[in-house]
Amino acid sequence: MAKVSSSPRKSKRKSIQKRKKKSVYRVGNWSAYNESLKQRGSLTFWFDEKVIKNWNYQGPSQQGAQYVYSDLAIQTGLIFRKLFNLPLRQTEGFLESLIQLLKVSLKVPDYSTFCRRNKTLTIDLPTRKTNDPVYVVIDSTGIKVYGEGEWKVRIHGWSKHRTWRKLHLAVDEKTGEILAATLTPNSISDAHEVEPLLSQIKRPITAIAADGAYDQWRVYDTLEHPPNQETPIQPIIPPQHNAKIKQHGNSKEPPLPRDEAIRMIRKVGRPKWKEQSHYHRRSIAETAMARYKGINGSTLSARTLDRQSVEALLGCVLLNAFNALGKPESFKVDLDS
């Protein structure tokens, strides 16, 4: 029986793949990065004089019972809880033993105080103090609140539906630092959170890269008139495959960025457009999601949305703190095929 030859298109694709060089990424600062990884597990604690001085509440008086502990004290305990995955009572005991070892004369909030104050705590993400323009990548991921594990569902089926939250992150493309974060129910669309994320970023933003879920006119309108700056932000968002040009090329109005992306895709193709626009740098956001779940886990222990938001933001605080200790500096190496 005669063999059927492959199509010219397939043979051409195979020849192109053979000509392409294989490449890998290597870490150039392995020694420094190795030390930073060790520091992440270090149990060397100390209380800064600023923390000791501001441990007790010093704000204005309020109606009813007055606060005893400052937000800094509550946040310190909740960070230890998130870092070591402790329940509230064990968090109280951990802080008491730590303060005794350090011989510091501070009282520790009880577990009920941690629970109450967790609801209204304001979290500021620690970021680098700079005013340099930033290229931001955004994305979202699901965080499980409660529900059966995969093994139980596979063997016995589910008895109650899983409940999820969506964690939205805005990440610095150059450093991998989390610049802004929000937590919403899973019914909220990704495009809805673009403006809340941008309102948290005080640095000038040059461009934003996001996947096709953000290809909505409300996103383009927000980037045209961003909340914290006067100049528009360049969108690097792939239009839908059936996208059509909204504004005719002969119009006297300035061209729309989405229309320009559609024209470029029609001219050079979608893969080439992604390469020319550096769209693939958007994967930095997915890397941040993987780092978040790898360090903080993929579940939330709090039961209400406001407390879950604080818990998720504390996870971002830890991630930025680890990032400040050191990160790998990789470089591309081409290998002969």
Image (spheres, rainbow, N blue to C red):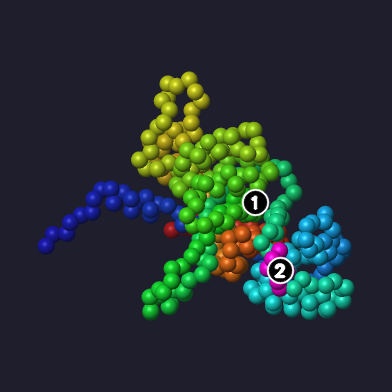
- Marks 2 and 1 sit apart, C-alpha to C-alpha, by 26 Å
Is 196 on the left or on the right of 276, as rendered?
right
Residue 61, image x, y percentages: 82, 56
Is the magenta region chiefly helix, strand or loop? Answer: helix
- Is 172 in front, or is 83? 83
Is 218 on the left or on the right of 240, as rendered?
right
Membership of 115 in magenta stretch? yes
Read off the residue under disc 1. 179
| Region rendered in magenta | 111-117
294 relative to 287, above or below: below
220 relative to 144, above or below: above
Q: Mark 2 packing: few (<14 Cα in 10 Å), some, or many (20+)?
A: many
What residue sits 52% from the left and 46% below the top?
192
- What is the secondary structure assignment of the residue under circle 2? helix
Read off the residue under disc 2. 114
Q: Which mark is in front, 2 or 1?
A: 2
